[in-house]
Each structure stands twice: as C-alpha cells, then as structure tokens.
Image: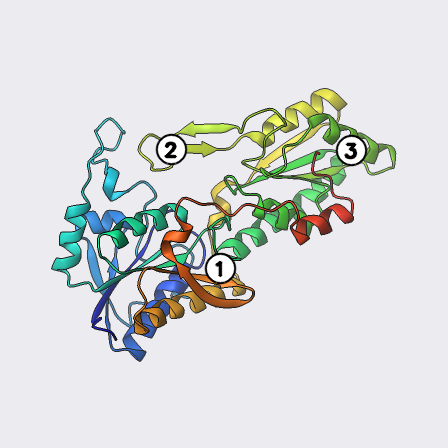
C-alpha cells in the first residue's frame, strides 16, 4: 500500500452518533483487506500531544457499530499550535506541533485518518503542510462542513429533534400555547430546517434568514384567529433577528472555538408572549441531539466514509477529504474545506418546499 504499514485514527472535535461506525470501518478494512496495523489515538489531537495511543484489533472494534459516542474519546479544545496546558484558560498557549511530529514518528505512523468537523480539518491541514499524510472524514451533526452534501451524525440529530418536536405538539395543543424547540447547528440551520419540516413546525427560524419578531407574532395570531389554537416553532441556536445579534450563552476561553451559542429560543418566547399575550414555552434540546445510537442512515454513511478513507491510502492519495457528492462517496483536497462552513443557500430546494407548504421563516 504505497509504503504504508501503520496508520493512526482519531476522533476529534465534538462527539456525534456514528463515530464508532467509522472507527470500525477504518480498522476492519485496514486490518482485513490491506494487512495494516492500526493505532487508535485517544481524545483527538490531545492524544497526539500526549502520546496516548493503543493498537486497534478486530476484537476491539467488534460490536461498536451501534454505539453512540466514540471508544477512542474526543476533545474539542485542543489545537497543537495553540495548546493550553492549564484547565482554566489562564496559561499562555504554546505551539507543541513538534511534539506531535515526534510522537507520530515514534509510533511509526505512516498516515492519519482524522474524523472531525471544520476545526479538526483545519488542524489536519497544518500537519499536511508539514509532510504528514492525513485523510479526513467529515463528522458533525450540524451538517456544515464545506465540500460534502451530508455529514454522518446529521440524520440522527434530525431524528432526535423531530421526535422532540412531535412530542411538544400534544402539550401545545392541550394548553393552546406556542411551543419553541431550540436545536443545535451553530451558524448553519440544517438541523432546524429538516427537523422543522419533518415535524410540521409552523415556524422555522435559521441563521441564514434573519427574522422579524413582528412577522412571527402576526403569523401566530392569525393562526389563532383561524382556529389553530397552538403553534410550533423550531429555532436554530444561531438564528438572530434582523439588525440584531446571535445570543451567546457563554465564552469558553480554553476552547479553539470559544463562543457557545444558545438562548435565542427563550428570547423569542418572551417577545411573543409580551406582544400577543399567548402563553409561550421553550425547550432547549442541547447535547441530547449528540447522544445515543446512530440511525441506520448514519451507520451506512459512516461505514462508507471509513472504507473510502482506507481506499484512498491504498491508491496513494494524500491530503484528501472523503465527501458525499450527488449520492456518490468521493474525495476533494483536504485544504479546500479549511476555514469554511456550508450554510443553507437561499435557493435550496428543501427551503423552497417548506415555504410552498406555508411555513413561516420570519421574513
């Protein structure tokens, strides 16, 4: 395999359903088809910094396909170029990239398979520029990694959010309330758009379309006048009003992405209740969207992605990102996804379909 004998695999960034399915596919394909050794790097790039790795065998990756989370652990606060050794963010960041390179050489790793989102791919690109062959596998429930039509973990998050929205229908109808469900997504509204449509939400608010609270209130009041005595609103954590700003729940100085969004659902609820007098309640799903077993679609996609990553190494490819384009698993240059986010285009056919069935987007 083009001089490759041992590879390392890691899960970096936030967790999501399907990570174990990729680890399993990478290990089983490498071990069984190509007779390679596979080292699991623990806790993402932190394991690379601290030289924490362990061999993966067929036995160690058996029966993990259905498990949520990751058997290797992960970390979304470590960048080798800005490594914070302290836990409270008070320490000065240091560049420990050389230490990582030493650990890669010491463990005789010929290539890395990095399973992660946009931040992880940016870190992987740094290693590529230093001569390390990295193959990226796109992971995020937010579905916002540039270059791929879909990321694994997204389908499961949408399924969880849809079930939550379905459940609040009954309590909203019973009490004649407006119910708001706030979902994840950062700056991209994919989860809100798809779960909102799947649940029949009356209003969907996403970061790509700044909303007018007056329009939402008018929509809700008109529904009430027509005998629709409750309304369901699905809102993305990154949504914001026209001329306003996103709601930040906290700043984490120890993280490579310190801004944590959240709380826009409660703000919109307060505004609607004050303007209309209609009782309004909020549910913030938070990390429940990341947990539990992956749905079938994510298990299949994750397996395809993991298998493709090893096939790229077999073909002698370097610095590639596995992607899904037009229903086909293929690959693009890893650096192409660096520093970019895949947002919902305003001409997206799913968005258009939602508008055509009467969904309000607050604009």
Q: Is residue 304 above or below residue 192?
A: below
Are there few (<14), some (14-19), or many (20+) residues within 10 Å of tag 3? some
Q: CA distance from mark 2 to mark 1?
A: 27 Å
Q: Which dot, 2 or 1, sits closer to the camera?
A: 2
The reply, left or right, for residue 201 in relation to residue 17 is right
SS for callout 3: helix
Indicate the quadrant where residue 24 lies. bottom left
Q: Which of the two discs, 3 and 2, labels the residue nearer the N terminus? A: 3
**What percent of the width, then of the height, locates residue 242?**
63, 27
User: At x 47% / y 51%, what residue is drawn?
Assistant: 146
Q: Nearer the viewer, residue 356 or 296?
A: 356
The reply, left or right, for residue 2 in relation to residue 265 is left
User: At x 47% / y 29%, what residue is drawn?
Assistant: 249
The residue carrying mark 3 is 219
**What percent of the width, then of the height, locates residue 165?**
64, 45
**Which residue is outermost to the right?**
226
Disc sitting over residue 258 in the figure: 2
Disc sitting over residue 294 in the figure: 1
Q: Which of the two discs, 2 and 1, labels the residue nearer the N terminus? A: 2
Indicate the quadrant where residue 42 lies. bottom left
User: At x 58% / y 37%, what residue is drawn?
Assistant: 207
Q: Is residue 153 visible?
A: yes
SS for callout 1: loop
């Amino acid at each position: 395999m083009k001089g490759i004998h041992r590879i390392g695999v890691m899960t970096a960034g936030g967790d999501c359903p399907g990570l174990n399915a990729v680890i399993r596919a990478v290990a089983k394909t490498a071990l069984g088809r190509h007779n390679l050794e596979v080292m699991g790097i623990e806790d993402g790039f932190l394991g690379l910094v601290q030289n924490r790795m362990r061999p993966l065998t067929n036995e160690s990756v058996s029966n993990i396909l259905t498990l949520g989370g990751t058997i290797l652990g992960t970390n979304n606060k470590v960048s080798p170029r800005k490594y914070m050794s302290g836990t409270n963010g008070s320490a000065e960041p240091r560049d420990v990239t050389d230490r990582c390179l030493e650990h890669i050489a010491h463990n005789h790793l010929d290539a890395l398979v990095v399973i992660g989102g946009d931040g992880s791919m940016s870190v992987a690109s740094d290693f590529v520029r230093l001569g390390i062959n990295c193959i990226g596998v796109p992971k995020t429930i937010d579905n916002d990694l540039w270059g791929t039509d879909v990321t694994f973990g997204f389908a499961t998050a949408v399924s969880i959010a849809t079930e939550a929205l379905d459940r609040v229908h009954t309590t909203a109808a019973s009490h004649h309330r407006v119910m708001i469900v706030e979902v994840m997504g950062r700056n991209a509204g994919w989860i809100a758009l798809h779960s909102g449509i799947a649940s029949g939400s009356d209003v969907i608010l996403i970061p790509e379309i700044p909303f007018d609270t007056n329009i939402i209130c008018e929509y809700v009041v008109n529904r009430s006048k027509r005998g629709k005595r409750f309304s369901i609103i699905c809102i993305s954590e990154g949504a914001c009003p026209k001329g306003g700003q996103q709601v930040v729940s906290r700043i984490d100085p120890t993280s490579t992405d310190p801004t944590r969004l959240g709380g826009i659902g409660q703000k919109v609820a307060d505004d609607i209740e004050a303007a209309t007098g209609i009782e309004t309640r909020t549910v913030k799903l938070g990390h429940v969207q990341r947990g539990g077993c992956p749905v079938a679609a994510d298990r299949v996609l994750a397996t395809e992605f993991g298998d493709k990553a090893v096939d790229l190494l077999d073909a002698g490819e370097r610095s590639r990102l596995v992607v899904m384009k037009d229903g086909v698993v293929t690959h693009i240059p890893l650096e192409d996804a660096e520093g970019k986010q895949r947002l919902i285009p305003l001409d997206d056919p799913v968005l258009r379909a939602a508008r055509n069935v009467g969904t309000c987007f607050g604009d």
